[in-house]
Image: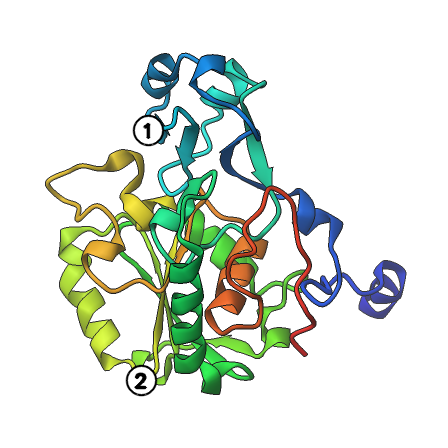
Amino acid sequence: MWVLRGLRNGVLTTRWPGRADEYASATRGPAMVKAGQAVAALPVTEAARLCPVDAISADKDGDVRVDQGKCILCGRCVAAWPDVFAWSAGPHRAALTRPGLVVPAAENPDTLRELTDQLRARTRALRRSVHLRHVDAGSDGSEEWEIMALLNPVYDIHRLGMFFTASPRHADILLVTGAGSRGMAEPLRETYDAMPDPKVVVAVGTDAVGGGIVSPSYALTGGVGNILPVDVWLPGSPPSPFAILSALLMAVDRIPAGTRSPGSTPGRDPR
């Protein structure tokens, strides 16, 4: 029966990023500002009041900006002002700096280039075989579901030479989810210290990036960046498995940094 089912269904594993994947391109990311929108097109004060996490603001030139690192994908801004806000699409949502999650981008290209070169030099030896350690630092569980999906036959993270490990002493990349509960701060630091160099920290999800809707709170640090040095920031509530894969491949220079866009840009074949 299983053989017949396999012959009938064919290969279900995605070929992304070696090949374009329609589902990857269509995955919903945090809210974004449509090109060319300014304060004149929108009562920013009202929009900011509507956003439960204060992700909407205006810069000194009057341009509307969305901090995707705060966005919880509630959709209030998109529903209220569809001519100004829209959903971002595609897996390339991660950034190498926290300010890099603010769109439209205001990040200095020279800074991004320098950080990319530094990360590339550190992770040069990790590109073909990478071990991941995941730590929950106060998550609501949604990011964990997406991380677990990486092990199913559709995403099959092992095909990319990436494997989960239970021991931080064998880990190259530390995936951290959750808003950074104070009770997990010391265990998280101990996990990080136990990892061999070179090591990379990826903050997975809006909670990990900045604390999410539950911050500020006496019980939270407001994101893992206040506990550990973060190398890759991945927004989303939660981020899709494709977005997590993109962040991991960016961390080891198998997808170029700076590819964040409303659409999807297929990466080079990592095999």
Question: Badge 1 is on which residue?
Answer: 60
The x and y percentages for residue 212 are 31, 39
- Dividing the picture into quadrants, the one containing residue 211 is top left
Nearer to us: label 2 or label 1: 1
The residue located at (66%, 51%) in the rendering is 24
The x and y percentages for residue 256 are 56, 65
- Image quadrant occupied by the N terminus: bottom right
Q: Badge 2: few (under 14), some or many (20 or more) residues near its Cα, within 10 Å?
A: few
The x and y percentages for residue 148 are 50, 59
What is the three-letter code of the residue carrying label 1? Lys
Q: Is residue 132 visible?
A: no
32 versus 21 height, above or below = above
42 versus 208 height, above or below = above
Q: Are marks 2 and 1 in contact (CB under 8 Å)?
A: no
Determine the CA span between mark 2 and mark 1: 41 Å
- Image quadrant occupied by the C terminus: bottom right
Q: Which mark is residue 13?
A: none
The x and y percentages for residue 155 are 63, 62
| Of residues 50 and 170, the one drawn nearer to the viewer in this rendering | 50
**Residue at disc 2, secondary structure:** loop
The residue located at (75%, 63%) in the rendering is 19
Question: Badge 2 is on which residue?
Answer: 197
Q: Is residue 45 visible?
A: yes
29 versus 244 height, above or below = above
The residue located at (46%, 69%) in the rendering is 251
Residue at the extreme left of the image, as rendered: 218
What is the three-letter code of the residue carrying label 2? Asp
Relative placement, left or right, of 177 versus 137 is right
| Of residues 11 and 71, the one drawn nearer to the viewer in this rendering | 71
